[in-house]
Image (tube, grey):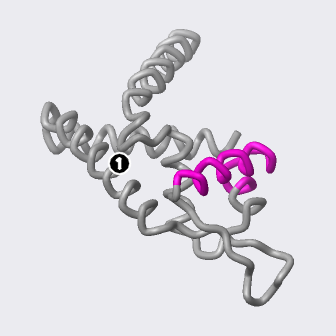
Amino acid sequence: MQNYIDILRQLNYELVKELGLFKHRAGLSFSQRHILYHIKNNISLSIQELADFLHVEHSTMSRNIKKLVQAGLVDIYQDEKDKRRKVITLSAAGESRLAEATDSINETISKILEVLDDEEIEIVIHGIHRYCEALKGN
């Protein structure tokens, strides 16, 4: 068992290191892309809801959102139903920048997949999916 743990720890390290290559695609950091992605896919999120969803402190999310607002990538509006609540939406520039980053990452992943046959791709997908599910269980 210890051998598997050692191998997985090393593979986790390599994945994180290599995924770092994805940072700064379209001028966005990994965390900025992650935030924009979740804003795009979740309508009417507040800063607190986004912080909770991404498991970060409210103050950390506020700083990130402030930078995204300054960059013109997100807008903050007062909720029409609850005036105390502010919601975050992607601006047109944010939509465009996120699409650019996503296209760039998809191109990289496509190149990686070219060295695998369909069966190997299915095995990788299944293995990563199971590994992620196990992580969520902890």
**Closest to the observer, 7 or 99:** 99
- 25 w.r.t. 84: above or below: above
**Closest to the observer, 107 or 67:** 67
Q: Which residue is drawn at 60% across and 57% down?
A: 69
Whole-percent x, y for residue 24 in the image? 42, 35
* Magenta span main SS: helix
Q: How many marks?
A: 1
**Closest to the observer, 1 or 120:** 120
- Quick check: is 24 in the magenta stretch? no
Q: Which residue is drawn at 31% across and 52% down?
A: 100
Bounds of the magenta span?
51-71
- 99 w.r.t. 82: above or below: above
The residue furthest bottom is 81
- 100 w.r.t. 20: above or below: below
Q: Which image quarter holds the C terminus?
A: top right
Q: In this view, does 78 lie to the left or right of 103?
A: right
Whole-percent x, y for residue 122 in the image? 27, 45
Whole-percent x, y for residue 64 in the image? 65, 46
Q: Which residue is drawn at 77% across and 89% down?
A: 81
The residue furthest right is 84
Q: In this view, does 99 lie to the left or right of 14?
A: left
- Quick check: is 60 in the magenta stretch? yes
Q: Residues within 10 Å of mark 1 (few under 14, many from 20)?
A: many
What residue is disc 1 on? 101
Whole-percent x, y for residue 105 in the image? 31, 43
Q: Which amino acid does label 1 sit on?
A: Ala
Q: Residue at x 57, y 69 (%)?
A: 89
Dot 1 falls on a residue whose secondary structure is: helix
Q: Which image quarter holds the N terminus?
A: top right
